[in-house]
Image: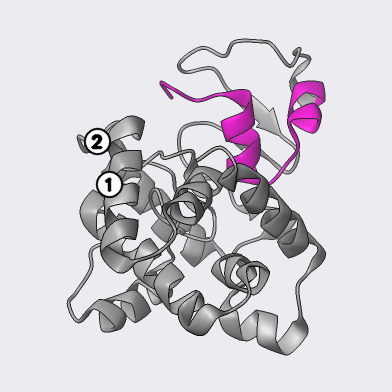
């Protein structure tokens, strides 16, 4: 897809750039072409959605719904990455969420790509799954359509607002976005969650 980079693909699929480079016989400086297929450890990027992410394989129904959402987004005109980034900043300011945190989450999740969809059916720039979208709708008091760029950003930022409420620890808030608030409370941070938290905190320095 236009605008995709090795680092963006690696981030989206939960693999390292070095592993992606090795799997495709590339160098870290290689350019990728529109339409080019990139083999990802655990799957293949083809323009629609595979069934694995971060070592997990998702049910056919979930992946099917993800592919439907991906096809819908591919057929839509969506804002550019720069425009989506600006929308994230604006929403963060409205919700009084640290704009650096909101941007770091959005970049980690999708690289500001509104057409991103994961095998878990996490949708759009903020990579919100449908059940979290329903929860975000309750938080904001209106129905949110995750395929709508404005609503997608609002859903993600509203969730961040909830996770950071009451001065909660930044690491716990970031982990909750990735693993789920209840999951972190019950099980602690999984190893991939700890990596996610570290990556987001590092990205915050860029914004």
**Displayed quadrant of residue 28:** top right
Say whether residue 176 is left or right of residue 80: right
Label 1 neighbour load within 10 Å: few <14, some 14-19, many 20+: some
Q: Is residue 148 visible?
A: no
* 44 lies above or below 106: above
5 drawn magenta: yes
Residue at x 46%, y 32% (from the top left corner): 47
Q: Is there a contact, CB below 8 Å, between mark 1 and mark 2?
A: yes
* 42 lies above or below 45: below
Instruction: Point out residue 198 in the picture as x, y percentages from the top left corner.
Output: 72, 53
Q: Nearer the viewer, residue 129 or 185?
A: 185
Residue at x 40%, y 64% (from the top left corner): 97
> What scheme was used to colour the molecule?
one colour
**What's the magenta bit mostly, secondary-structure-wise?**
helix
The magenta stretch is: 1-22
What residue is pinned by disc 2?
Answer: 79
SS at badge 2: loop
Q: Nearer the viewer, residue 83 or 9?
A: 83
């Amino acid at each position: 897809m236009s605008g995709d980079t090795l680092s963006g693909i690696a981030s989206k699929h939960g693999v390292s750039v070095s592993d992606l480079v090795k799997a495709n016989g590339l160098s870290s400086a290689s350019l990728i072409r529109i339409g080019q297929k990139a083999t990802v450890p655990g799957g293949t990027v083809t323009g629609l959605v595979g069934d694995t992410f971060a070592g997990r394989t998702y049910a056919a129904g979930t992946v099917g719904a993800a592919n439907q959402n991906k096809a819908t987004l591919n057929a839509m005109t969506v804002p550019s990455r720069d425009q989506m980034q600006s929308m994230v900043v604006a929403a963060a300011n409205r919700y009084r969420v640290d704009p650096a945190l909101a941007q770091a989450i959005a970049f980690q999740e999708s690289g500001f790509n509104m057409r991103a969809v994961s095998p878990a059916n996490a949708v759009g720039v903020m990579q919100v799954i449908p059940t979290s979208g329903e929860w975000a709708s309750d938080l904001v008091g209106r129905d949110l359509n995750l395929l709508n760029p404005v609503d997608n950003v609002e859903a993600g930022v509203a969730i961040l607002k909830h996770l950071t409420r009451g001065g909660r620890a930044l690491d716990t808030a970031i982990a909750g976005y990735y693993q789920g608030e209840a999951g972190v409370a019950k099980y602690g941070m999984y190893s991939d969650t700890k990596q996610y938290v570290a990556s987001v905190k590092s990205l915050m320095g860029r914004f």
